[in-house]
Image (tube, coloured by chain):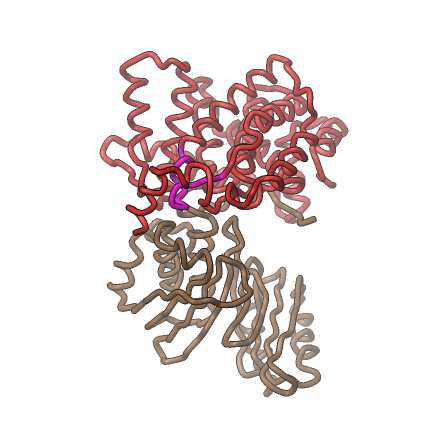
Amino acid sequence: MKEYGVFDVIGPIMIGPSSSHTAGAARLGLTARKIAGEEIKEVVFYLHGSFAKTYSGHGTDKALVAGVLGLEPDDERIKNSFQLAQEKGLLYSFREKDLGEVHPNTVLIAMETASGQRWEVTGSSLGGGKVRIISINDLEVEFSGEYTTLITFHQDRPGIIADISAVLAKYKINVAFMRVFRLNRSANAVLIAETDEDISNAVLTEIEKNAYIYLAKVLRPF
Amino acid sequence: MQIRNGEDLISLCREKKLPIHQLMLEYECFKSGKEPAAVYEEMRSHLLVMKKSVYQGLNEKLTLKGKIIGGEAKKLQRRSQNAKPVCGYTMSRAISFALSVTEVNAAMGRIVAAPTAGSCGVLPGVLFGLAETFELQEDRQVEGLFTAGAVGLVIAKNASLSGAAGGCQAEIGSASAMAAAAVVEIMNGSPEQALHAGAIAIKNLLGLVCDPVAGLVEVPCSKRNVVGTANALTAAEMALAGIESAIPFDEVVTAMYQVGCALPPTLRETSEGGLAVTPTGRRLKKEILG
């Protein structure tokens, strides 16, 4: 049985009309933007299932663009996000795509950042404004973004998880959930740790000292 | 502290000699580790968003437009200014507020899902309708939101709050039960009476299907927020008079869950049945979505 809190029932504060198709979409867009970590130059949204069929009626398109622009799910500017994108020079487009056996409200967000990095983030809107990120750049992952989330991209080898855990322990950061994912043995792997405390940039820098960790990021809840 | 169902809620209230809203505040602090003042303030910020959305659709300058609906709240307000409302002043105000919030939602404005965006008008409609008639202080309304939250939480745990899973009864029915219980506590009724009101509210909307035209949160959603509002006020009035639900709250919630499971998928937010597939429903869909 899931442990509901009162604000799961009275809330979220959001921009209408639909918690799954508008608020969830905005959250997915913003989470993708935070994973990319910098301003986005161009984005293509690949819409699956119900998202593909109904996106314009619920403003799913405007919400996704708003998120990628950095707006939060309760920002009243979501309504005018297309105009905002034009002003900021963000190129965006929408395509329908069958993403396979995934939740009906799923989108693949393919971004190119201002510095030319490419990021692909796939996530599902689960209802009530809640989301789940299911892949980053072909690596399967799973997290909600409701907690402070540490993401590391590293080489799959012994000791990496222990090193990361040691740094977190040193700064008294409690891990609520932790998962590791990899493409195949000795190849690229990703670790997702959802924590109760904030992870400061200093902690992040310490984690990144490990030579086998290519990149570490922190997503803070919004 | 464990709140699995309505029975837990009542026995905890009895044991601690607290109203539901205070118990809910304690529970949230216990669960989140936050201070009561912080949790209270967060709830107050939700009330303030509701307050803005309640008056936004009644603003004379602005007409809120969805794809189909828009301007209905103002029509109701105008009538209540020019004629004696047939359903009484409190009800008339409450339903115009409920409509206003649904119009804000359809027009991509800011609302509080309570418990869902589709049912976002009921709780603010009821709370602000009541506030005008009884000159309620803000803290009574915030308390009402905690009462409502407790009832919603129990429904979420034992049935569903989503139209896709349980039909409209799960959204408007739940919102109405939450609002009914809130009214009872605001009017100094007991926790038992609050749950009787909740049970009555659900019973009267049991079986309501989710059949949105063109898949939009507009038709019939907006006016169902009105019926949820009216239903909450009548259920609360009955409970405050000492009328009890013959079927206890927890059994009603279970019945709602079972009815939701028995509903065919065509009547659970897929827009493949009910009003969505009427000739006019189909025409509207074609006009809007092409």
Residue A38 quadrant: bottom left
Task: Report the residue at 40% width, 56% height from top.
Answer: A53
Residue B211 is a magenta residue: yes
Colour-to-chain, red = B
Task: Report the residue at 57% width, 66% height from top.
Answer: A149
Residue A44 quadrant: bottom left
Instruction: Relative to B244, say whether B63 is above or below.
Output: below
Residue A115 is a magenta residue: no
Q: Which residues are magenta?
A: B210-222
Can you see residue B274?
yes
Q: What shade has chain A been given? A: brown
Q: Position of residue A220 (x, y in %)?
A: 52, 62
Residue A213 quadrant: bottom right
Assign the N terminus of chain B to one quadrant of the image: top right
Could you say which is closer to the camera, residue A157 or residue B159?
B159
Extreme left residue here? Answer: B61
Q: Main secondary structure of the magenta part?
A: loop
